Image (cartoon, coloured by chain):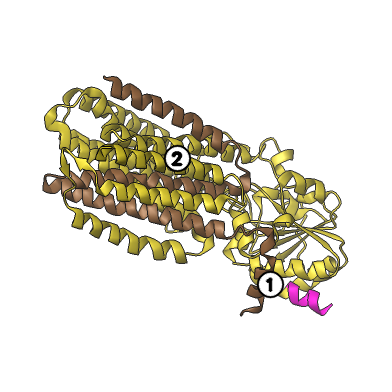
Chain colours: A yellow, B brown
């Protein structure tokens, strides 16, 4: 068997492990195993590549290559290992962005490398697509990272004529691609690189913090497509298969996520959702109704008399790192024979399934986590619904108010429970920037303060009772 | 446009269908690990980056290839480690005894 055939066979093996890994991620039991299988397949592919011939010679610059890998390794491992679980979304964003950047660089370098051989038009097209998509993914992910890390405002950034400017830059990129296809000009390729970078930035700016997860999923798919495009240029089946798998699954995942938010993808990407804050943030409404606030001890008593309690956790819980204390509270209540469930909204936290990860980290038993529809049927017989750091996902305006920007979004109907308790930092509205009528409902009690502090006091009060 | 391109296009089409089929059945609680896991998989661009650096004949190509290998390594390593850390949290129900031990520890 020739050397090239053997390497190609190993690549085939790697591609197979990637498919198996994605398959494994479909069940909680096999997911971790699946990820390890993919990591092993990746290692095989990387080692095999060291023995590959390029243009009829063994790889040049192997020491330099090892140095670059070493740099990547010593940066990535500590970052990935020690960053807090709440910061996961921005980590995924940044690791996705660098992948897009790498794909873009690969495409550019290949163009520089082969341009003297007068490549066919379709080869140049592959290069250009790789550069455009990869760079948009890189720049977009960087802005998404900045938004989630709160290096810049999480609210949509808008300015007059935004749609027009975005459209012009988009069209200019396309025009440039056509020009390069005709002229095979290298300087213009660098202009395209810059333009794609600008496009990535201005594309992401108007997207609000709540929608950024959907965006990351889309950019993840973009990077996959950029990798597939590089695969075409380099003539590598492995890159085409892996890139396309990620591209196709990423686009589907993006659609599932926007569906969970009850909105269409174009609406998420182009409507600058949440740019205007319509909520007053006052404890008193114009019509004289006001919110009722209570102390953690009041709530502990209320919980003590309940027989069925549903927790609805949101991002505020994650921010205050209160998930462990929440589990403690659940344990205390269960000791008293009170049934406890966690109602998980599909987009609770910052990414779909993010809340499940955070609660699993706090050792919350898997069977207590119920999905939205089941939570809503549990809530009909629940005595208390404890909303911890969530807001938009329990806002009844989504079903009642046709004029509301979140109208149509599926919500957890906290208002079905006998009593509703909100643990909130302040009257500040959620990501959507709108008023929540439920806060003013007569059966609602608010406890202001950091979720973790409040929960700690509640645990103490329940224990003492 | 030769046979090779057609071959690649065939692979592309099949990969699209496989990608869609596999993902359609993933439960929503695993969406985050899935996104992260597929993020790690597109780190396979490292293989492309290695080929680019390994074939570099000018300083410009060397610099670009070097940068590409660093970025791609970040993607691969970070992607897999983050995903593993997330999935570590999804313990099977039989691991309760182990959890109890954790609680005793400070």
One can see residue A295 in this view:
no
Boundaries of the magenta span: A458-465
In x, y percent, where is residue A293? Answer: 76, 65
Q: In which quarter of the image is residue A333?
A: bottom right
Q: In this view, does A237 lie above or below B71?
A: above
* Spot occupied by residue A278 in the image (x, y as percentages of width and height): 61, 47
Q: In which quarter of the image is the N terminus of chain A?
A: top left
In the rendering, at what x and y percent does residue A311 appear? 74, 58
Residue under label 2: A16
Horizontally, is A402 left or right of A297 in the view?
left
Q: In this view, does B57 lie to the left or right of A315?
A: left
Residue named by callout 1? B100
**Observer-nearest of A12 and A158:** A12
Q: At 59% from the left edge and 48% from the top edge, which residue is drawn?
A: B30
Q: Which residue is drawn at 24% across and 28% down?
A: A124
Q: In which quarter of the image is residue A242?
A: top left
**Magenta stretch: dominant secondary structure:** helix
* Of labels 2 and 1, the one closer to you: 2
């Amino acid at each position: 068997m020739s050397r090239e055939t053997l390497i190609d066979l190993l690549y085939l093996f790697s591609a197979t492990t990637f498919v198996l890994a994605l398959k494994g991620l479909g069940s909680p039991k096999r997911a971790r195993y699946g990820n390890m299988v993919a990591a092993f397949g990746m290692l095989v592919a990387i080692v095999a590549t060291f023995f590959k011939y390029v243009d009829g010679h063994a790889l040049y610059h192997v020491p330099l290559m090892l140095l670059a890998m070493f740099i990547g390794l010593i940066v990535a491992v500590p970052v990935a290992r020690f960053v807090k679980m709440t910061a996961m979304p921005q980590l995924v964003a940044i690791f996705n962005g660098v992948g897009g950047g790498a794909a873009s660089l690969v495409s550019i370098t290949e163009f520089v490398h082969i341009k003297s051989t007068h490549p066919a038009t379709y080869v140049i097209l592959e290069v250009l697509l790789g550069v455009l998509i990869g760079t948009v993914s890189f720049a977009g992910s960087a802005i998404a990272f900045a938004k989630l890390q709160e290096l810049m405002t999480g609210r949509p950034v808008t300015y007059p004529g935004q749609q027009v400017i975005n459209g012009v830059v988009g069209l200019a990129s396309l025009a440039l691609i056509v020009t390069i296809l005709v002229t095979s000009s290298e300087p213009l390729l660098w202009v395209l690189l810059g333009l794609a970078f600008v496009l990535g930035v201005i594309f992401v700016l108007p997207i609000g913090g709540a929608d950024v997860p959907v965006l990351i999923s889309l950019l993840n798919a973009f990077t996959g497509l950029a990798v597939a495009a590089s695969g075409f240029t380099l003539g590598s089946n492995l890159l085409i298969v892996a890139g396309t798998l990620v591209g196709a699954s990423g686009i589907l995942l993006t659609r599932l996520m926007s569906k969970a938010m009850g909105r269409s993808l174009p609406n998420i990407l182009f409507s600058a959702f949440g740019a205007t804050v319509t909520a007053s943030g006052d404890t008193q409404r114009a019509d004289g109704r006001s919110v009722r606030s209570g102390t953690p001890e009041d709530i502990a008593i209320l919980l003590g008399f309940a027989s069925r309690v549903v927790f609805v956790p949101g991002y505020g819980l994650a921010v205050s790192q209160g998930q462990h204390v929440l589990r403690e509270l659940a344990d205390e209540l269960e000791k008293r024979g009170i049934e406890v469930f966690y109602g998980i909204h599909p987009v609770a936290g910052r990414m779909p399934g993010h809340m499940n990860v955070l609660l699993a980290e706090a050792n919350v038993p898997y069977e207590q986590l119920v999905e939205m529809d089941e939570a809503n049927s549990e809530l009909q017989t629940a005595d208390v619904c404890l909303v911890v750091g969530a807001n938009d996902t329990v806002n009844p305006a989504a079903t009642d108010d046709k004029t509301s920007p979140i109208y149509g979004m599926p919500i957890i109907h906290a208002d079905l429970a006998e009593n509703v308790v909100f643990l909130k930092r302040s009257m500040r509205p959620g990501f959507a920037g709108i008023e929540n009528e439920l806060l003013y409902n007569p059966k609602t009690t608010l406890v202001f303060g950091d979720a973790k502090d409040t929960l700690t006091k509640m645990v103490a009060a329940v224990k003492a009772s | 446009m030769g046979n090779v391109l057609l071959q690649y296009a065939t692979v592309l089409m099949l990969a699209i269908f496989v990608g869609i089929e596999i993902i359609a059945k993933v439960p929503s609680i695993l969406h985050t690990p899935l996104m992260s896991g597929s993020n790690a998989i597109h780190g396979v661009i490292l293989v492309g980056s290695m080929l680019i650096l390994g074939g570099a004949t000018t300083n410009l190509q060397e610099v670009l290839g070097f940068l590409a290998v660093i970025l791609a390594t970040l993607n691969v390593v970070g992607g897999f480690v983050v995903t593993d850390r997330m999935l570590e949290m999804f313990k099977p129900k039989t691991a309760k005894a182990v959890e109890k031990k954790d609680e005793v520890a400070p």
